[in-house]
Image (cartoon, grey):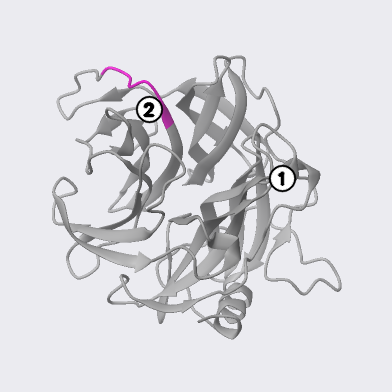
Amino acid sequence: MSKVVNGMAIPNMPWEECPKGFDGPIWRYSKNPVIKRRPHKEISRAFNSAIVPFNGEFIGVFRGDNLDDIPHLYVGHSKDGVNIEIGEQIHFVDENDNPIADTMYQYDPRVIPLEGEYYIVWCDELCGPTIAIAKTKDFKKFVKFDNPFLPYNRNGVLFPRKVNDNYVMLSRPSDSGHTAFGDIFLSKSKDMVHWGEHRVVAQKGYEWWCALKIGAGPVPIELDDGWLLFIHGVNRTCNGYVYSIGGIILEKDDPSKVKARCKQFLLTPEMDYETTGFVPNVIFPTCALVDAPTGRIALYYGSADTYTSVAFTTVDRVVDYIMKNGR
């Protein structure tokens, strides 16, 4: 059994037992999607978002595509992790509490509990898309840092603790479209401001389902002997792009190194709410709740760039699948 060593007990997190006779690595929630169209008076669609346990319930940061199709970030609340209420749009301040002007767009946030605070990493506008970082203690005041990287970059994901006295972040350098770069890199920082020592972690094209590009998904899950990383992988077909979920195990003390990488996708668009929507054939993971004592995982993903959906697995089940079907 793989042990979750950097986690907490979440006894009230969403959970649904694996369907009888199902032998895949991940199974879908029977009541998907958990966020449907028009969840808020200002929002057409909410997806590619992240929640965390907070005061016995759940809170998070949500991508909300407005009625003009421009995405911004919103706070969302839930008592049970599946019935989610989207609240107000987030506006940022600097370290001296001075308001910071909103950028043109913000999308695909991850929320990372780290050192007693919550860090938000998302794709922001800086003469093109790149990564932004902010922190909060109460999900009311959000303090924004300088952008860690130049454009173009996406899919920034912080590790939930320092590794060898460094903050560590995964990202995917890119261009302004469906990039020819498409690989996952790791970068280090001593202060969350200056980032360097960049290393290639995983590259696209090892399998057809991720031939075009790959990117980090939720916050890496620390195990006794490594890190479990869910990713998305993109294939280009004659009918457009297909986004699937994959899995990688990283080395514990040097997460720029891959121990195993699953040759097969873990989940691919198959249900109507994944194959039909604003952008068809997309499942995009951005959040994983993990109950450390049981190893249960609730994996949140955007479906068809229209809905928010949930799938379930366990640490043992998915790690075993990756190792048995991995390079």
Residue at image location 54% in from the left, 71% down from the top:
293
**Vertical position of residue 140 compared to residue 297: above or below:** above
- Whether residue 197 is situated above or below residue 136 in the rendered picture: below
User: Which labelled disc corresponds to residue 140?
Assistant: 2
Q: Amino acid at mark 2?
A: Lys
Q: Is residue 163 magenta?
A: no
Could you say where residue 178 lies in the image, as x and y percent from the top left?
Answer: 47, 43
Q: Residue 223 at x, y = what percent? A: 44, 75
User: Is 187 in front, or is 83?
Assistant: 187
Q: Nearer the viewer, residue 233 or 11?
A: 233
Image quadrant where residue 144 sits = top left
The stretch of residues the image draws in magenta is 101-106
- Kindly identify which numbered label has been placed on residue 274: 1
User: Left or right of 320: which side holds 83?
Assistant: right
Helix, strand or loop at label 2? It is loop
Badge nearest the viewer, 1 or 2: 1
Mark 1 residue element? helix
Q: Residue furthest front?
A: 238
* Residue ID at (23%, 37%): 147
Local packing at callout 2 (Cα closer than 10 Å; few below 14, some 14-19, many 20+) is: few
- Number of marks drawn: 2
Q: Which mark is residue 41?
A: none
